[in-house]
Amino acid sequence: PPGFVESSCRSRIFWMKLNKLFLQGKFFQLEIYDPYAGPVLLDEKLASRCGYVLSEDVWGNPIFRASVLGCHVANEADELFSLTVNIKVSSFSSMRAAVTYTYPMYCSYPSWASREIVCEENYMEVSVKTDVPAVSNDYTVAWMSALPETQNVAYQQWQLMFVSPSGRKRITVSDAVKLGYSFNNTLSRVYLRAPYHSNESDISVVSGVNMNMVTSTSMYRQRWLLLLIDTTVSCPVDGISFTDTTLTWTVPSVIPTLVVQESTFLSKNIVMGVDDQVIVNPEEKNYLVEHNKTHVRVTIPVGAEGGKLKSSVSGGVYGVIYSINLFLEHTWTDAGWQTTKYTVIKSITTPFMPQIPTVINNTVPEERLFNVAFGHFLPDVSLVAIAIGNVPFTPREAQYHGLKVYETLFSNRTKGFILEVSFDDPYVLKEYVNRNETKYTLLVNYTLSMGAEMTLYYHAAEVECVIADIELPEAAGYCDEENLYLTLPTFGLHQYWDLYLGNTLLNRHVALTNGYLAATNSTHLILQIPLFAVGVTYEEVSFQKIRARFDVVLRKVRTMETLQMFSVSCRFNSSEFIICHPDGTVMISAKMKTVPAIDMSKTKLRDSSCKPREYNEAHAFFKFHVTTCGTSVRFEGDHIIYENEISYEKETLPAQSTPSITRDPDYRLTVLCYYQAKETLMLGAFVSDSATSPPFGSGTVAPRSNTAAYRRVRQALNVVSRVSKDESFMEFYEPNAAILKRSLEPVFLEVELKDESPSVELYLENCWVTRSLDFNSTSRWNITVDG
């Protein structure tokens, strides 16, 4: 079919290329047509013996090359050559039902050099003219050593003499064929074709390059004619070196076994080519050809035109392999030979070169769209699948999901894959960070298909973008006559942040327990806090006036970092209240509820010396500590209850005998303060544990009459501590005196409970030293811990 076969004649080589597109999914064989015996199937053994090569170019197209001196080539006067090839194509590996295409090739090559050497991939070939000059005195020792053997050469028969390190071997042409050699003569030439690494060959090093060499003499005797022809051939078997960016091919300039007198060597011409094309100006393709007395060196940049980069995967690592098919023709003269044309054909492939794919984050935060470029890849790479998070998509499924996946070309002839994903995609990870920012994380797993083999390659990438797209809530506060109110947006609540009351999470249970009322609508949370509820801070308390504040803290859900504090503060007019402070201070505003009215200035606590701080006709304001004014204490469950009462001393009229006469009514008001039982009373000061106790105690007001049942009155605990000067505990330091102690010097401390009640016991739990009178000072040195 048209376009299936292309052929050319380069120098003395037939070149034929088959288009791989016509062979996809099929099998093929080549047959060489023998004019006398018919078609002969081409195999490796026949190829190396007869001067044929079957390989591929870098693009995967089958390539067939044949020497014009091949076994089945028709030769017309050593100038015109023809070869017919049958191409058999079948859909079956058994080649049944094959279609045969017959393709003749022609080549004209009239300008032979005196000696021509071809170094092919699978054979070495030397051909020489038979009209060589007469034997001179400059023959080498190896040449002269062959002369005695010629006496035994049969008449009218060619024989071959091989010289190797193991000795000399003389064999007939038919025996040489059995060893893989091919020898024949044409009208004007004799040629020898030898396989690499035969038993008769030898390896020598010439200018750092390993050469495979077959030293041979062809002998012919007919009556008075004795013909000796040097058919020695030597070809390089390595000479390839690589860097990350170049490959270098080195061939020796002067090969001693091929040049009789090196002093007469003269290089005439050097030609390089790619495939079957001569490169006239190598520098235009960035090739470098260097020639000196010892070497011909060709340097090719990796990826240069004429070769092919191929994607590959090795051990899960992506990389490339570069291949190029080169040939080199070196023509020289020397005294032994008029002209030698030396041709080397070399297919070069670099080792696997790892490449690190790059992930380029082109995301524009303002567009809220990830834009990720993944490259750089050769054209033989395709995207098979892409996973966002752990969810895989084919490219078609990705488009349906709303992702954009498309290819892009880069300036260096590579390509990449662009992925666009919205920040709001459900498979994008979102994390609240800093104060008002969101970190969006895109986890991508690419699955790529590499090369014609379609090897799968996997690559994971992580792309992040942090933008300030969260607005911190702003709270509003107000009050009515009995409550404080705090209103704030519900957006982000419990998702990004939580509300805390001190160190306690303010949830529905805490709100209900503390007596708060929480209500939400579509946008806001409204919190109602009664004036005397737990958590209210009383900034200022005076006669019938209270300035109260309620604080909540906004903290991150995950890190507990404090972002903001919301406070609402109001002034209240209150005629009756009791406030129990955490330090044991109690403030009471008592209202007169007697008929007739009493003089509030004459009211008192249990200790008659504790009088009201302020008063008017209807109210009295008291302020005292739970350890003073006759305050008693009792335990109920998990609470300590401090109790006192406000009373009024009646004024009696003088009388001669009982009963006495008074015009004042009874007035008694019982005051109770509740604290958690795990609190500690130290030297008359109430110390609270902020982590476990509410910010303030809770108080109740209960009026009592003088007809109440008998009450057992307890005095407040009286605890005294002193520091003794020595272990005798006989002499003590004065209170508030500065005491200087060296490190590790003992301190003798005495704590005494001055309470005679048999139901009260003293347990010393914790004892510490601070720099100030504040028990909660952060500079603290423990003396005893947990008793």
Image: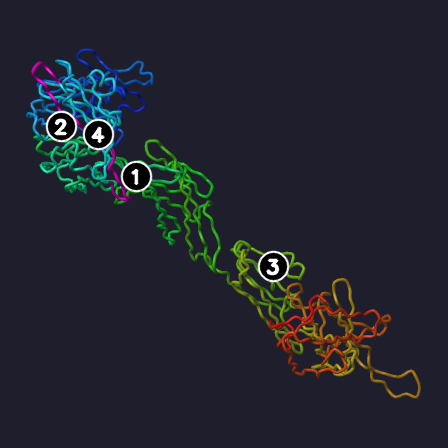
| Image location (x, y in percent) of residue 58 | 25, 32
Residue of label 2? 116
First reached walking from the N terminus: tag 4 or tag 2: 2
Q: Nearer the viewer, residue 449 or 312?
A: 312
Q: Are marks 1 and 2 in contact (CB under 8 Å)?
A: no
Q: Is residue 602 above or below residue 16?
A: below
Q: Is residue 781 visible?
A: yes
Quadrant for residue 773, please give it. Answer: bottom right
Q: Nearer the viewer, mark 4 or mark 2?
A: 4
Magenta residues span 220-247
Q: Nearer the viewer, residue 33 or 243?
A: 243
Amino acid type for the residue under numbered disc 2:
Glu
Q: What is the spatial separation of the Cα atoms under label 4 and label 2, in whole angstroms?
A: 15 Å
Q: Nearer the viewer, mark 3 or mark 4?
A: 4
First reached walking from the N terminus: tag 2 or tag 3: 2
Q: What is the spatial separation of the Cα atoms under label 2 and label 3, in whole angstroms?
A: 96 Å
Q: Is residue 581 visible?
A: no
405 in magenta: no
Q: Is residue 640 above or below residue 589?
A: above
| Image location (x, y in percent) of residue 769 | 65, 74
Q: Are marks 2 and 3 in contact (CB under 8 Å)?
A: no
Q: Identify the mark at residue 378; answer none if there is no mark.
A: 1
First reached walking from the N terminus: tag 3 or tag 4: 4
Give the crowd class for mark 2: few <14, some 14-19, many >=20 residues within 10 Å: many
Amino acid type for the residue under numbered disc 1:
Leu
**Residue drawn at the location 14% of the way across and 27% of the way down:** 143
**Residue drawn at the location 67% of the way across and 82% of the way down:** 736
First reached walking from the N terminus: tag 4 or tag 1: 4
Q: Are marks 4 and 1 in contact (CB under 8 Å)?
A: no
Q: Secondary structure at mark 3?
A: strand
